[in-house]
Image (cartoon, rainbow, N blue to C red):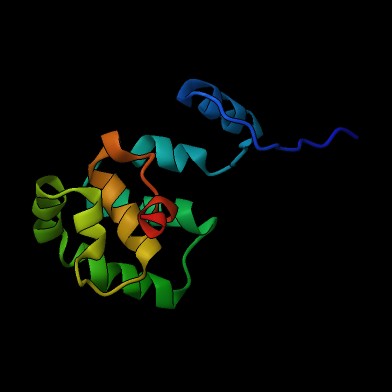
Amino acid sequence: MNLPYFCKENTNIQQFAKIWAEAYDDKNEPLYDQNIGKLTKEAIEKLFIWKNGNLLSEKKTKSVHGNYILKLEHLKTLSKQISPEQFLRKEFSGGMIWKFIYYISGNQKNTLYSTNMFTAQ
């Protein structure tokens, strides 16, 4: 059995993306590919399922609905007007990762910006 391993090595962005793409295998990737950049109720629900790795529990479904779907028009406008850093600092209910998923759902150009990058700043 061959297992991948990663070592600390400086590289360019293209090589970084290539290395990690080869290690990434997700059965739910079509949910991401088909819904990223779309700000519809259905697309956001599917992105949250993608992030979660499977269907959402009743509690998470209520959270997504209350924190994002009901605020869709406001958040749709806001996510286009401010940077990822500003958006993630806004005082919305819902956890950091949920804010990130919502942000990238409307800003495909910023999909490499992660909560880890935000936290490291």
- Front-lying residue, 75 or 88: 88
Report x, y in % for residue 111.
Answer: 35, 40
State which quadrant residue 53 falls in. Answer: bottom right
The residue at the point 35 percent across, 53 percent down is: 101
State which quadrant residue 19 falls in. Answer: top right
Q: In this view, does 74 lie to the left or right of 56?
A: left
The residue at the point 70 percent across, 36 percent down is: 7
Q: Is residue 42 visible?
A: no
State which quadrant residue 41 falls in. Answer: bottom left
Q: Which quadrant: the C terminus?
A: bottom left
Give the number of marks: 0
Q: Can residue 50 be seen in this view?
A: yes
Furthest toward the bottom, the residue is: 59
The residue at the point 23 percent across, 44 percent down is: 106
Report x, y in % for residue 117.
Answer: 40, 50
Location of residue 118 with respect to 33 vertically, above or below:
below
Location of residue 35 with respect to 119 vertically, above or below:
above
Q: Which quadrant: the N terminus?
A: top right
- Front-lying residue, 103 or 29: 103
Report x, y in % for residue 78.
Answer: 11, 54
- Front-lying residue, 106 or 3: 3
Report x, y in % for residue 39.
Answer: 21, 47
